[in-house]
Amino acid sequence: MTPWILGFLGFTLGPTLASLYLSFTKFDLLSSPTWVGLDNYRFMFTSDPRFLNALRVTFVYLILEVPLKLAFALAVATMMDKHIRGGDFYRALYYVPSLLGGSVAIAVLWRQLFQGDGVVNKLLFAIFGVQGPSWISTPETSLYTLVILAVWQFGSPMIIFLAGLRQIPQELYEAASIDGATKWKQFARVTLPLLAPVIFFNFVLQMIEAFKAFSPAFIISGGTGGPVDSTLFYTLYLYQEAFANFRMGYASALAWVLLIIIALFTSLSFLASKYWVFYEDER
Amino acid sequence: MSRIDRRQFSSYGAATLGLAASVGGAQAQSGTRLRCFWWGNPERDKRTRAALDAYEKKAAGVQVTSESIGWGEYWTKLATQTAGGNAPDLIQMDYRYIYEYARRNTLLALEGVMPKPLDLATFSPGARDSGKVDGKLYGVTLGVNSKAMIYDVAMFEKVGVKKLDLTWTWDDMARIAGEISKLNPGKYWGTGDNSRWEQGFEHWLNQRGKFMYTEDGKANFSRDEVAEWFDLWDKLRKTGACAPAEVAAMNTGAVDQYEISRGTAAMSYANSNQIVAFQSISKSKLAMSSFPSTPGKPSGHYIKPSMLMSVSSRSKSQEEAAKIIQFMVNEDAGVKALGIERGVPGSSEAQKMIASDLDDLGKAQVDYVAAITKVAVPLPPPPPKGAGEIETLLRRVADSVAFGKQDVKAGAAQFHMEAVNVLARA
Amino acid sequence: MALRHVLLAAGAFFMLYPLLWMVASSFKPESAIFTDLSIIPHHLNPENYINGWNALQVSFSRFYWNSFLIAILVVIGNVMTCSLTAYAFARLKFRGRNILFALMMMTLMLPYHVTLIPQYVLFLNIGWVDTILPLVVPKFMAVDAFFIFLMVQFFRGLPRELDEAAKIDGCGPWRIYWMIILPLSKPVLATAAIFSFLWTWNDFFGPLIYLNDIANYTVPLALRAFVDSTGTSAWGQLFAMSTLALAPIFFFFLFFQRLIIKGVAMSGLKG
């Protein structure tokens, strides 16, 4: 416990409080901050359409990305849990997209896949004979290409699921199969309940991460959030305000509003978890 | 934080991580140490390091550490360092950002170190003054450029245009672009969309004898003018001469995302020194010319710095930093090491020093800048705070017009209104 | 079983596509990278690898060493201190536990961009800027709430009877942590080690802010020095070096994931 308290006090608390203070100031990075009271917050809620747009983009992304990614991660983890030949190999391959993370290579690749004459459209044409739009540069579809990117990088929750699955005692499955339970029933009655703490962890963390999603939009839109702000994620907007438009004070206010939103959703998740997540140490 | 705290913290770190502490951070060397920070690529990295090495050899006891990163991350890091009071001694500056930094007193006014050790007598007045903000010099240009239209030579030849000169007009552009678009309908277009590029709009205003901003930092364009600009491109889009919205929106402003780099159009609008970058990733042979002209009107082109070198106002070695700049822009070894990689040198003497080393693209740049210099309009007044934001604003609004989300008039009204708001808020 | 293999293999192709493309691109001439989409290398000319390795004024061996050192130290720091903190949260009863837990979760929620500058000023005052200390020392103080929370969730999955039994045998909390919890938690410790290593290896923002001299750069930082979005970029070399940068994390992953899979024999724990 002590190291955490020390670390928290030493490295986290100070900067956190500093950002809270900055959110009540006008701070252009290069000269000293000046106190402006609630001005930043007032502006945000009364006259900033880009703030509302960024919220909307982030929520759409979150609602699609989190369940899809978790479903993929859990499905693949379950498939790989049982001993299969080449298991190591598959796990590593499925982790490759996540290894690439937010690299420049991914940015270049993604734009090439989803551009007008990109690989995706060539496939669509070959299979269905339809000509798709330039997915990545059309405001109506660009966000979904980022959802696909995020879902495709499902490696981290997959590994966490795997670790969780490894902690489930094999005898429970054996007992269940003696009772004549099918694979599906075993999954529903043994795997899911015992995996609940891990599912809960992945859910909460993926949700927080989705609220804070930054690098996919940043690298792929070249930091613009375009076209027409269709991929302007909340933290991307915050970043633009802080470092491109020299409004660190306003950016700090944006950050604290986001923190409150995330805290709200996280608390709700924790409250709801009482009804579906049961821990071994509570039995 | 008091001194005792500092020492305690440091010893804690050193004790737990002796190994780690031994890496980097060796500050305790004798002599003068300076830090030089620039954005770039391996080529620029090597050249700049060579220049700094040559300087170190010449000035005993001086050591310059080099820091370098790509354009996008450069400004985040520089802002953080500056905010922390730890800016590098030598800072590569951009024409757009120098105002932001100079007006917040983070850069050194160079008058104090001129004419000795820094002597810009052989600079053309335009090249020298391009580093001025509000009457004082805050940066020395490492190279000059002007806006340029980069085009695909083979495509132009296919429609019977051998070589462009500075007199070609907007009508010529519409005609040539229209013909090129017909060569490969729906896949390849005559021109990229310039309506969304703030510098394109600025240039168009300059041709009408206006600057984009007034001396006191207000927007110097009307709603009608914006509408006229949008309308110009809307027509080109409708006739098929200009690439459609979804192709234009691919262009995020990075060199590799321009129409001419992606092989979707025969003309893209950029800066003259960037032709090297475009050529390096293009399969076809490229050339450059001026933006389309309006007969009887000013060219709209002006000579501006592609990159500047500035000195931090908090540098402890300002004199030495000035000497290094002097070395880079005036002395044979420094000038030759840097070459034309950052653009055409501002000093006529320096231009002579590198003349024999130039390749074709280098010569093209020198010739282009020389030709533009003859027809150039005066340097606009410094952009106000918030000008950078207007660049992203124009891209966003122009795109929404191109995608048909609003018509030209509504788009023009939105851009004008938001631009005024941005400038008022900055 | 066969179906499972077919599915997994088909999926693997989609997963592997970017890697194939990246390798192919590292062999393409620069003018083809943005227009040629094939994933089959044209000619196996290694010059991008050779030139890329020495493209900057310091060679990549230096960047690898810097990255490696930071990543290993972070792994050690995270696994040691986060597991200890997580144990306290999961098993010990103390006043203010819930509030501290909520505070810890909060540190996950604030976008780091706004704490960047205050943090930078802090480390500047300690004199750690341009060393690896700001990237490493905090990890020895369990600042990574992600891992604490992860471990709490796993520790809580261990039956409490084990602790009780040990307590009766006279074990204190330290011994329970060391003799019971840790050995049973290999999968999650391996998971934390993997993520610590991978994320630190790939981390870009921290090194960007705290490391100045090129000689102190990490691999991802050096890679960004290849791309100048306003000018010429060395794309072929970038892809070559990006491919090589994957190797260490790939092998680290291969090795440690075995620990997750081997895990522990849980038999006998359940009555």
Image: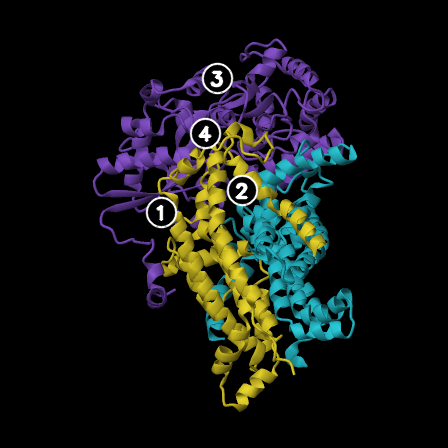
Chain colours: A cyan, B purple, C yellow
Q: Which residue is mark 3?
A: B372
Where residue C11 appears, x then y in whole percent? 66, 48
Amino acid type at circle 3 is: Ile
Q: What amino acid type should be assigned to the residue bearing mark 4?
A: Ser
Give the secondary structure at mark 3.
Answer: helix
Q: Chain of mark 4?
A: B
Q: Are marks 2 and 3 on the same chain?
A: no
Q: Position of residue A138 (x, y in %)?
A: 71, 37
Tell which tag, 2 or 4, sits nearer the viewer: 2
What residue does disc 1 label? C215
| Residue at x 36%, y 35% (from the top left corner) | B46
Q: Which residue is mark 2?
A: A104
Give the Cα separation between the discs numbered 2 and 4.
Answer: 25 Å
Q: Is residue B66 above or below residue B365?
A: below
Q: Name the foreground residue: A191 vs A197.
A: A191
**Residue B18 visible in the current orientation:** yes
Query: What's the distance in space between the residues labelled 2 and 3, CA to CA?
Result: 36 Å
